[in-house]
Image (cartoon, rainbow, N blue to C red):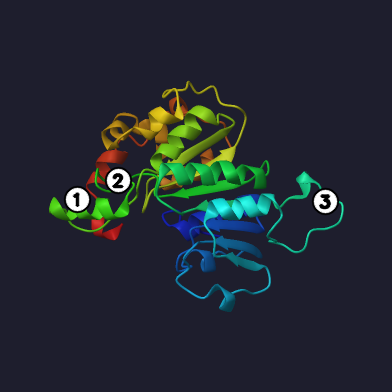
Amino acid sequence: MNFDLSASVGRIRYLASLRHARKYLEIGVRDGATFFAVPLPLKVGVDPAFTFDPTEQEVSGTRFFPLPSSLFFHKLKKRQVEVWGPEKEGETMEDRPRFDIIFIDGLHTFEQSYKDFTDSLEFAHENTLWLFDDTVPCDKYSAIPNEEESLRLRKEAGCPGSPWHGDVYKTVLAIHDFHQEYSYCTLMGGNPQTVVWKAERSARNPLFGSLQTIARMRYCDLLTYHVVLMPVEDDQLPRLVGKCLSPADLVNPFDNALTALMTKDHQNW
């Protein structure tokens, strides 16, 4: 089966095929364009502001939670919500829901996307795969974490389009430094996204020292450290996913990733 590795749905379908996935979690569903196109039997969508009536879309195996993601994970941890069915008597911590694929596409901020990742670890397993959206901003305006400010400054500067990615890229840098049992790569085709998986503990050398240092970074710093994102061509994913990686392992990294990115038609983002 062929998969379009340049788009979210194709990437998710490919990752699901690798793991024979059945259980899917999407943070940030909005209109459901990606969610409804993912053909897995057990799906959970979380969004505080669905643009459709989720009660009209729930079918067997599909659940929607109109909650902020942090509250969803809190309730899931406390067993105040059900995803697959009522809790069984005698269940332990290890019996908690474990998702095979987790797509994080909520708030475009480092603070929230990183929290979504760390919160989700409790509901993952050894073979869980994550896909992070919007991990490579296309310019300094796109990298501003406040959407209103980002669009205002872009308009004032006379720049075309309205792309907004926020500072989700910092979550990838945090995974590089502080979660070395996870490897990743960033697919640069289409709207760049980062795939994360558990692997042998990497020997990556931490670069930033603290989460506070990462939080203070700006777009110009990303240009300096862009190789830490592990930018690769989409068709490299099959030979990389599942392996223990660090930026130094890429013999031929996508060196022109940022150059290509800067010349994209921003209106298509």
Q: How busy is the neighbourhood of tag 3: few (under 14 within 10 Å), some, or many (20 plus)?
A: few
Q: In the rendering, which numbered label is found on residue 91? A: 3
Q: Is 147 on the left or on the right of 68, as rendered?
A: left
> Quick check: can you spot residue 36?
yes
Residue 198 is situated, as x and y percent measured from the top left of the image, at 61, 37
Mark 2, residue position: 144
Q: Which mark is residue 202?
A: none
Closer to the chain start, of discs 2 and 1, is: 2
- Alpha-carbon neighbours of circle 1 within 10 Å: few (<14), some, or many (≥20)? some
Q: Amino acid at mark 1?
A: Leu
Disc 2 and disc 1 in contact, CB within 8 angstroms: yes
Query: Considering the numbered disc 3 on the image, is that residue within a helix, a strand or a loop?
Result: loop
Q: Residue furthest right?
A: 90
Q: CA distance from mark 2 to mark 3?
A: 44 Å
58 left or right of 168 in image: right
State the residue in front, 1 or 102: 102
- Say whether disc 2 or disc 3 marks the residue closer to the N-terminus: 3
Q: Quadrant of residue 59?
A: bottom right
Residue hosting label 1: 153
Q: Measuring 54% from the left and 54% from the top, which residue is drawn there? A: 69
Quadrant for the N terminus in the image: bottom right
Between 45 and 12, the one lying in front of the other is 45
Query: Is the residue 263 above or below the residue 58 in the image?
Result: above
Task: Check the picture and name the quadrant holding the C terminus.
Answer: bottom left
Residue at (30, 35) in percent of width and height: 218
Q: Amino acid at mark 3?
A: Glu
Residue 253 position in % (x across, y down): 38, 33
Residue 161 falls in image quadrant: bottom left
Of the pair 266 and 95, the residue shown nearer to us = 95
Q: Nearer the viewer, residue 66 or 103?
A: 66
Q: Residues within 10 Å of mark 2 (few under 14, many from 20)?
A: many
